[in-house]
């Protein structure tokens, strides 16, 4: 006998949680589709030579290689297996767009919601298998910065639908960052990266650590420069006009960096279109501390945080990149995109006790219990009637006491029970019990679908 | 520069086909949920020792093993890698139910729609990665045969929704098969299996081959016995009453096999409940030639075929098994289930030219072109209005000639275009073009969502 065990580092859910998880996946997909993005799915594995063109040490060490038994047994096989599991959805997107370039229309607007794999050391909240829900817009040769406004708009629609509390989409721009540091005399890209790494520790280590580090031997920045950096990275705009004011202030303080000017112009356009797309100004802001992947993003960058749970960190991040697939094609493919790491987000929401509202409610809407075994045919006909009416219905086929069947429905999160006893059959009626409202009523048999549809459209608790 | 290539043996789709594929996945999921099944997802890999407890040569040779770079580089690692990709959804279901047994309610009704992996030699129509869409009902200790009627019912609902043409769900029973051969004196299980393997070749090799083989040296059956087998396996009932008559005939011819009697009783109950569940009698039949996995299924077995495309073979198969997870738990877990191999089905439908109706129609319902760059704000506000109204909307942000934008919508399968020029802005209206019906009309701006909803609810071509 083998002990059944889920592999470590995976998020396997029991049905009530899986239902809640699936509802989140559905809401994200509906949001992406509402904004006109098209679905793409790619194989879970890629050819190793295709997958591992760009990656450096850390990623490659975490890659899962795949090989069939036959390949394993061949002593003279290739040094590395032929296939490897995708570690993100960006490399597969690059491969997909480069491979199918001449069959796609640009700008290519795609969403992709699949699992990715990283051979991480297992620890709480770190997963070896997790969902990413990505959306990207890829241009050919060029892509207007206007598209950078679509990411906050679609993310706003989705997180509003998910109803996991107030959130803020924080926007910055890598050109603005680069220009700001250039103006301070920090021109070298490596030095900029080193400063940004230290600045990233501000929340954890505090201002004094940053002052002493940046003025210390390794960096040797003037105190005044460090104060400028500290003031800059703490900027969070408090509304649309305030964001424009902050940009004007940075512009006024510039010593002429072209990169800074370009970043400011892009942010102005992006913010104005984010507003035009109907995102309330309370839900987005400028945050000059956001840098993201230092060698990947080149323009707009985004992070999204839950206002009441900043400890969760960014729940959705992304940005603009200059060239998606330089390793696969000579075509220049600039793009902008954003990603929701749903497995991690779901786990964090559960840890924070924020899933209560959505979990517990089954996909099953109605239980048709077995009141009387003699009436099995009638009971199944009722179940069929409900299903034809589009209502998710479970029919009890094993019998047992009615009380036990009702308790099962209640525990399983099934809201309605449709009872058909001999009285109901004689009268041509059905008795409906609403287990949430602890209510019951009897309807003519031919009105049961419409009656339940009305009930299902109403909130579970009066006044909700 | 690396050539971007999809790994062989995978079904990667361009967006229009992916949309059609996703619609099929959605229809299957909706069908499973309408019948009260709950979603389960398991990790793509299982621990190798857990996955490979039961399997013999063929399956094990096709298993894909998974290991991280670190494990690959360890010379003294385990002989077999720790993880392996699932090759079906049945073993993960067994592991899931055994592992979470005390947190599940039985009968446990779950559906699972995920990809599975087999290291097959690549060839046309054979996939190394493919979707399976499984539904199973698992009992604890026992499970009434009534549940065997739910599989044909849910499959009937789903294939009706998929609208891929008329189909027949063919039902048989392993106990009946076993009893029939027992009555003929073929009692030994291995001999029965050998006969069934030959009978399976009937369609390809013909009756004469079967006669000579079964009466030949290897089998040595009497000619009369072979004629009885030939008559038996060619039984296809032509309606509900005919099915009952066929069963009565088999019963009358029995020499007293208890297994045969049990199989007949089960089939009678299953057929009567399939009818009670509203499946039209034209859509199911008895087919005594169906055997399925010889050592796995123990009672009812199912296959489903497209009436107009028998060459495609079974598009959905399954059956009843005695004990799901004997390798993981001492609990007896009988079950019944059915599986749709969607990747292969999709590929076959595409090859047979049966996908035309569903492909080509985008998930994007409305394009809002850029008529006048000066009106960008108005254009985006209109796009937001449509999206808030639940309409999937793409807004053109890059401009270009209007004719080109309309041609894009047409080619992309986007049915409606919502035009907002200076005249419309002045009038407070929107002009809607229906590219399918080649029709256009103008509506007040605040009625655009309701007008489009009415249009979207109507068929694309009048009279459809």
Image (cartoon, coloured by chain):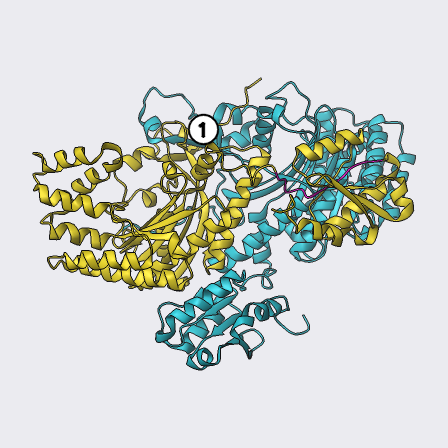
Chain colours: A cyan, B yellow
Q: Using the rendered view, name the quadrant where residue B53 is placed.
A: top left
Residue A309: x and y in percent read: 67, 55
Q: Is residue A172 inside the magenta stretch?
A: no
Q: Is any atom of residue B464 visible in this view?
A: yes
Residue drawn at 31 percent across, 27 percent down: A73
Residue named by callout 1: A83
Give the secondary structure at mark 1.
strand
Residue drawn at 52 percent across, 49 percent down: B27
The secondary structure making up most of the magenta span is loop
Q: In this figure, what is the number of numbered marks? A: 1
- Reply above or below: B108 against B346: below
Residue drawn at 30 percent across, 37 percent down: B59
Image position of A321 (left or right of A386): right
Q: Which residues are magenta?
A: B361-371
Q: Is residue B364 inside the magenta stretch?
A: yes
Residue B73: x and y in percent read: 41, 28
Q: Is any atom of residue B325 visible in this view?
A: no
């Amino acid at each position: 006998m083998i002990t059944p065990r889920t592999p470590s580092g995976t998020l396997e859910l029991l049905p009530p949680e899986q239902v809640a998880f699936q509802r989140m996946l559905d809401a994200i997909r509906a949001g992406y589709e509402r904004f006109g993005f098209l679905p793409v799915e790619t194989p879970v594995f890629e050819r190793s030579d295709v997958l591992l063109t760009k990656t450096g040490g850390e990623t490659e060490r975490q890659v899962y290689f795949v090989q069939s038994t036959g390949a394993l047994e061949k002593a003279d096989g290739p040094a590395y297996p032929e296939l490897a599991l995708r570690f993100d959805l960006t490399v597969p997107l690059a491969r997909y767009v480069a491979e199918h370039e001449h069959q796609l229309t640009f700008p290519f607007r795609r969403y992709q919601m699949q699992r990715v794999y990283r051979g991480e050391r297992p620890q709480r909240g770190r997963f070896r298998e997790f969902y990413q829900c990505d959306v990207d817009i890829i241009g050919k040769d060029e892509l207007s910065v206007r598209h950078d406004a679509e990411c906050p708009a679609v993310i706003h629609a989705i997180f509003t639908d998910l109803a996991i509390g107030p959130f803020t989409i924080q926007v910055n721009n890598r050109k603005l960052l680069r220009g700001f540091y250039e103006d301070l005399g920090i021109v070298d890209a490596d030095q900029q990266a080193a400063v940004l790494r230290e600045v990233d520790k501000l929340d954890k280590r505090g201002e004094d650590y940053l002052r002493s580090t940046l003025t210390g031997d390794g960096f040797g920045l003037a105190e005044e420069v460090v104060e400028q950096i500290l003031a800059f990275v703490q900027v969070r705009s408090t509304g649309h006009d305030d964001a424009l004011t902050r940009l004007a202030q940075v512009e006024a303080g510039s010593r002429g960096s072209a990169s800074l000017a370009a970043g400011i112009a892009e942010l102005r356009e992006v913010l104005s279109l984010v507003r035009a797309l109907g995102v309330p100004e309370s839900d987005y802001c400028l945050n000059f501390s956001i840098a993201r992947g230092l060698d990947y993003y080149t323009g707009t960058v985004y992070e999204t945080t839950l206002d009441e749970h900043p400890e969760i960190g960014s729940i959705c991040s992304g940005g603009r990149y200059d060239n998606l697939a330089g390793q696969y094609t000579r075509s220049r493919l600039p793009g902008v995109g954003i990603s929701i790491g749903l497995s991690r987000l779901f786990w964090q929401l559960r840890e924070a006790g924020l899933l209560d509202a959505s979990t517990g409610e089954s996909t099953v809407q109605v239980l048709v219990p077995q009141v009387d075994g003699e009436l099995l045919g009638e009971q199944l006909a009722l179940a069929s009637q409900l299903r034809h009416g589009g209502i998710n219905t479970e029919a009890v086929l094993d019998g047992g006491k009615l009380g036990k069947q009702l308790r099962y429905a209640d525990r399983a999160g099934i809201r309605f029970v449709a009872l058909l006893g001999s009285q109901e059959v004689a009268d041509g009626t059905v008795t409906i019990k609403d287990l949430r409202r602890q209510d019951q009523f009897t309807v003519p048999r031919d009105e049961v679908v419409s009656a339940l549809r009305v009930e299902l459209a109403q909130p579970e608790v009066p006044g909700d």
